Amino acid sequence: MAKGKVDALLGIVFGDEGKGKVVDVFTPRYDIVARFAGGPNAGHTIIFDGKKFVLRSIPSGVFDEGKLNVIGNGCVIAPDLFMAEAQELEAAGYDLRSRLHISKRAHLILPTHRVLDRAYEAAKGKNRVGTTGKGIGPAYSEKASRTGLRVGDILENFREKYEALKARHLQILADLHYTDFDLSGEEEKWLAGVEYMRQFPLTDTEIELNRALAEGKNVLAEGAQGTMLDIDHGTYPFVSSSSTVCGGVCTGLGVAPTSIGEVFGIFKAYSTRVGSGPFPVELFDATGDKIREIGNEYGAVTGRNRRCGWLDMVALRYAIMVNGVTQLIMMKGDVLDSFATIRVCVAYEKDGVRTTDMPYDTEGWTAVYRDFPGWQTPLNGLTSEAEFPQAFREYIDFIERETSTPITIVSVGPDRAQTIQR
């Protein structure tokens, strides 16, 4: 029997590209859908049958009754937020306990992690990163310092371990003179979430996944955020705290590099970014506002305005290189329907120096643009590539030439049906 493969589905620039919708479209092809990184700071929005779901920690394959979904060891989980998310899905009729396994090696986000997140941000002043305040960074920090709590810890002597770590956090907060918090109600919900999580299969997911691969089953690894928010390869320090790139699939699920098959890179027809940090293509004018409004560019978890700009080929090429992308998926081309001219950043410039390579630090670099005629016709009713307007076809052809990577799927609207295979 041929061994199964792990295909990676990644947001490859700054995230927020619509991974959830594509995972939902792809799920029928796979036996297992697995999250390998991130936590409840990543919202994946899925719309179908007139219903909208925002998934934060739970893989986007849970809507298919026949699929196993896995939260891998590379993730961090807030039990109270997980409970709220899961109960919302259960109320909508989805039996999660029969289709969702959680890695015992995944780390827990404590209520005090969220307080620490806010305290650390406040201490940075104008240099703040712009985190979601969900406790992601402090939880991953403690994973690295070997002091964190893992999902498997809730199975034995948990309260003792929890109280010890909480006391450590409270001491840090006292040292920072940070007093703007009240844990009472939040902690009660969090502990209820721990009890709720005990009702799910808490397993050695790395063993399960490798056994499934040995049996010829295929896995879809669902990413969170994007390459430019990767802890190693992103715009540090304005990044997330986990490995969001393809290499993170191996460490975040416990699978070998030889198990990786296709690497699908999802990007928007334009650029967005949430949080602080350099963003050379950012538009501060009416054009940026128009893209935001048409594209509904507000954070799925936080509701924050996303910073908007034109497509950035420097970042896109870099992300394709780092991830080994084999196929591209372009989202939200329909958002640009009404623009007479569409611009693409083809290089960065600073102090008279021009580069097409991603700099170590993108602060102070400005975008060099190439202009394209807009297609100025609605895309959202199209059902096949043959119906693409010529200007839209030329836009796609340019991106493929510049990246040496085929765009095999084009999304022309938020519904799962508005997805065109090329």
Image: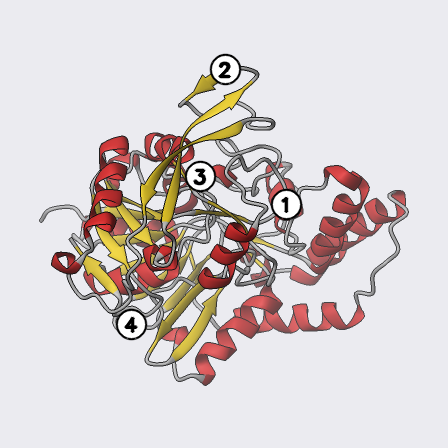
Residue 245 picture quarter: top left
Give percent across and percent down for residue 349: 50, 22
The amino acid beneath tag 1 is Gly
Tell me if residue 231 comes above or below residue 378 in the rendering: above
The CA span between labels 4 and 1 is 32 Å
Q: In the image, what residue type sits under mark 4?
A: Asp
How much space separates mark 3 and mark 2, taking CA atoms?
A: 25 Å
- The CA span between labels 1 and 3 is 17 Å
* Badge 3: residue crowd in 10 Å (few <14, some 14–19, many ≥20): many
As helix, strand or loop, the secondary structure at mark 3 comes to helix
Please, is residue 95 above or below residue 284 in the view?
below
Are discs 2 and 4 less than 8 Å apart at CB? no
| Residue 64 numbered mark, or none | 4
Q: Does residue 160 appear left or right of residue 395 in this picture?
A: right
Q: Is residue 405 above or below residue 60?
A: above
The reply, left or right, for residue 309 in relation to residue 382 is right
Task: Indicate which label's residue lies in the foreground, 3 or 2.
Answer: 2
User: Residue 137's mark?
Assistant: 1
Q: CA distance from mark 4 to mark 3?
A: 28 Å
Provide residue 298's location: percent of width, then percent of height.
54, 60
Q: Residue 227: which numbered mark, if any?
A: 3
| Three-letter amino acid code at the position of disc 2 | Val
**Picture coordinates of residue 300, whole percent (x, y):** 52, 63
Mark 2 or mark 4, whichever is nearer to me: 2
Mark 1, mark 3: which one is toward the viewer?
Answer: 3
At 46% from the left edge and 84% from the top edge, which residue is drawn? 91
Mark toward the start of the polypeptide (1 vs 3): 1
Residue under pointer 2 = 353
Identify the residue at horizontal 79%, vertical 41% (top origin): 125
Q: CA distance from mark 2 to mark 1?
A: 35 Å
